[in-house]
Amino acid sequence: MKKNESYLAEYAKLCRAADQVEADLFEQHGVLRGLRDKNGNGVVAGLTNISRIESFKMENGVKVPCEGKLWYRGYDCIELIEGFRRKRYGFEEIAYLLLFGALPTEGELKQFKDILASQRTLPTNFTRDVIMKAPSGDIMNSLTRSVLTLASYDKNGSDTSIENVLRQCIGLISVFPMLAVYGYHAYNHYENDESMYIHRPQRKLSTAENLLQMLRPDKKYTELEARVLDIALVLHMEHGGGNNSTFTTRVVTSSGSDTYSVIAAALSSLKGPKHGGANIKVVEMMRDIAANVSDWEDEDAVRNYLQRILNKEVFDQKGLIYGMGHAVYSLSDPRAQVFKGFVQQLAEAKGRNKDFALYSMIERLAPEVISQKAHIYKGVSANVDFYSGFVYSMLEIPLELYTPIFAIARIVGWSAHRIEELINMDKIIRPAYKSVMQEMEYVEMESRD
């Protein structure tokens, strides 16, 4: 701490004393911390036609955990992936579905892809003057800054008509890969002293293909690499209105704010390690396990190390096995289930079978270890973050881009929820907070301690 900032420790101490609320008061006043009850049920804050998460069923009036399901506009997400995975890239098709509520015909999909391709362009000198001007290893901050700056180039930036918001959202969906990848290249050049190259997106390529060719020095990628990344983008595209960044989207939209400010707020939410950074922690944890367990095939040794992680003895000493468990899903996360098969294909192609075997073993052992350590009110299983970080590492995507890639996918869901909120908006979203402060009598300056 700098000498002239020594006051901060004392001020922080005052804040802790003034702002600490006793934990039992939350229960006493019926406050659901995190807007979720002890069973993980969220406070219902709105209605949506965009997606649905299924993690339990009612049997004879009793809530019973079930295998997880994720629905996009009424379609089972797994069925959607099975429908396109061998025939075409799915990002653009599922983006159309989420935005407009119906699966596109061949002609409608071609038109939409042409529109996205035509929007993959940034204002003149934007890359040089905005992205490269202040490079940062925090690519999410770079992405947020770029989004807010784009507002300055939009003559109708504050127009919240559905037509104009659609134009803005489609434009942002199109340029997000460029903003993220160029932001990384600027950082990698100016901060890491690596070579600088800026590859333009190609009109005929899919979002996943463009992302890989813009990122790599030689622009090369295999079809399997692009298809697995495409599926990852589809699986991260949307996840109900209750996740933090999507709820942020709806809250800020309800205030009447413009699209760029709304998406910047959503990005700020997503960058939090409790939301969008989970797959980074999985990769770091797996590296730690691999380095400290000599025999990856020894289940007892792996189980013992997982127990030590839970006991806060090793790794980051937080007592968490990252990638395990979910706020909503219980028995399984459908995204992880469908993703695992594609992850295995990529691992075989990349010669990473041993790594995949370790991931699979931990996926099997971790729920057992966790249930022995603590009472679990619902099942615990691997979530999509458990495998997505492994995929990105096999695709040689740098850690700095893990969360931005999440944003490249989730911008579609945010856009759909923004439009739905605008169409149905009645009141500004304004939750209540109950004050528990004590009333005080004013004290004259000379009488204060």
Image (spheres, rainbow, N blue to C red):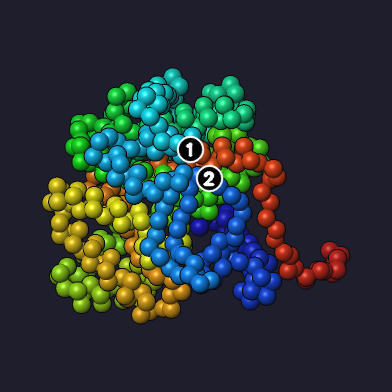
Name which residue lies at 44% across and 19% down.
124
- Quadrant of res 36: bottom right
Measured from the top left, where is residue 398 in percent x and y?
29, 45
Q: Is residue 421 left or right of residue 149?
A: right
Residue 87 lies, in percent from the top left, at: 25, 36
Mark 1 or mark 2, which is nearer the start of the sequence? 2
Could you say whether the residue bearing mark 2 is in a helix, strand or loop? loop
**How many numbered marks have been drawn onto this rendered protein structure?**
2
Q: Is residue 447 visible?
A: yes
Q: Find residue 199 and report its horizontal and vertical position in percent.
A: 29, 27
What residue is shown with label 2? 49
On-image quarter of the C terminus: bottom right
Q: Which residue lies under the disc numbered 1?
A: 101
Q: CA distance from mark 2 to mark 1?
A: 8 Å
Q: Secondary structure at mark 1?
A: loop
Q: Position of residue 75 (x, y in %)?
A: 41, 46
Could you tell me if residue 183 is visible in this image?
Answer: no
Q: Residues within 10 Å of mark 1 (few under 14, many from 20)?
A: some
Q: Are marks 2 and 1 in contact (CB under 8 Å)?
A: yes
Amino acid type of disc 2?
Asn
